[in-house]
Image (cartoon, helix red, strand yellow):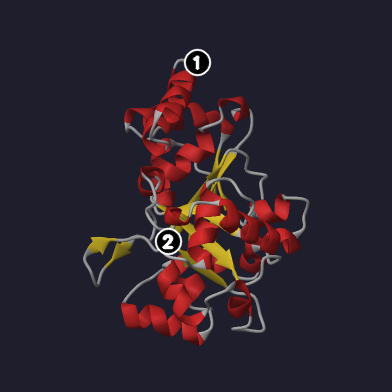
Amino acid sequence: MEAVRPASWAELHEVLFAGSWKPELRRFRSDFAFRGRNDAAEELATSLQRHAGDAALEGHLLRNFRKYAQREDVASDSVWNWLALAQHHGLPTRLLDWTYSPYVALHFATAAVDRYDRDGVVWMVDYVRAQDEAPAALRDVLTEEGMNVFTAELLDRIAPGRYELEGLAGEDFVVFLEPPSINPRIVNQYALFSLMSRAEARLDDWLERRPELVRRVIVPAELKWEVRDKLDQANVTERVLFPGLDGLSRWLARYYLAR
């Protein structure tokens, strides 16, 4: 998969915001979702796929999470809301974290100071065009509602469960899901998730056959300190993205670390 390697902060901006102008709206509205990682060698494997490599555990994990979690924690009793809540709290799931914000993605590409000896990466996926390859029933409901991504309630109309989603097509497909605003962290991170039709399916494998939908933007190791300092000045920090004393402590510990 082809990668772009900007050499400066200015060039990094040009790459991240490229293609965001919408002439029909006369506004800048990007169709890309962003995912930042500290290590450019990391692939797009879900936490469920990394967890002993056994996607068959999904049903057991989710069933027991629903059993022991408080029911008032989800906006509605939808498997997609439960998956989003579980992902948010660290349970291995088939979901991958993304954000609408390139700055939030850059934060996650530069948050681990102990990895400044290696390149980071921001993945960019055109989520609008990616979902054009979803089954017609899913595309139709997005069109009817004038939306670009799914909510749990919208996805429930066509696929109220994991097996119903898989059964919509004989080939793998991806949808993007906005989680409910269950707390300020999800809101501040401008979050959304990608969701493959099968728990075993890999998004990077799917994108490998569709290179026009994806960009890998390398954040060079030698550029990380500048990116990090400018994000801090722009108030894109742990204090904002992880509201509360834990986020505040993480921000202060990193901010006052000597280079």
Determine the secondary structure under disc 1. Answer: loop
Residue at image position (56%, 26%) is 113
Along the viewing direction, whichever of 251 and 40 lies nearer the viewer: 251
Sequence-wise, the earlier of marks 2 and 1 is: 2
Residue 208 vs 183, above or below: the answer is below
Where is residue 67 drawn, in percent x and y? 59, 57
Mark toward the viewer: 2 or 1: 2
Q: Residues within 10 Å of mark 1 (few under 14, many from 20)?
A: few
Residue at image position (48%, 86%) is 137
Residue 140 vs 184, above or below: the answer is below
- Please indicate, yes or no, whether residue 216 appears anywhere in the rendered image: no
Determine the secondary structure under disc 2. Answer: loop
Where is residue 223 drawn, in percent x and y? 51, 31
Where is residue 10 drawn, in percent x and y? 38, 40
Question: Looking at the rendered structure, which numbered label has been put on residue 133?
Answer: none
- Please indicate, yes or no, whether residue 83 appears anywhere in the rendered image: yes
The residue singled out by tag 1 in the image is 257
Residue 21 vs 140, above or below: the answer is above
Along the viewing direction, whichever of 233 and 156 lies nearer the viewer: 156
> Extreme left residue here?
26
| Amino acid at dot 1 | Leu
Q: Quadrant of residue 184?
A: top left
Where is residue 17 drawn, in percent x and y? 38, 53
Residue at image position (38%, 35%) is 243
28 with respect to 53 (left or right): left
Q: CA distance from mark 2 to mark 1?
A: 35 Å
The residue singled out by tag 2 in the image is 178
224 with respect to 205 (left or right): left
Q: Quadrant of residue 147?
A: bottom left
> Extreme top residue here?
258
| Amino acid at dot 2 | Glu
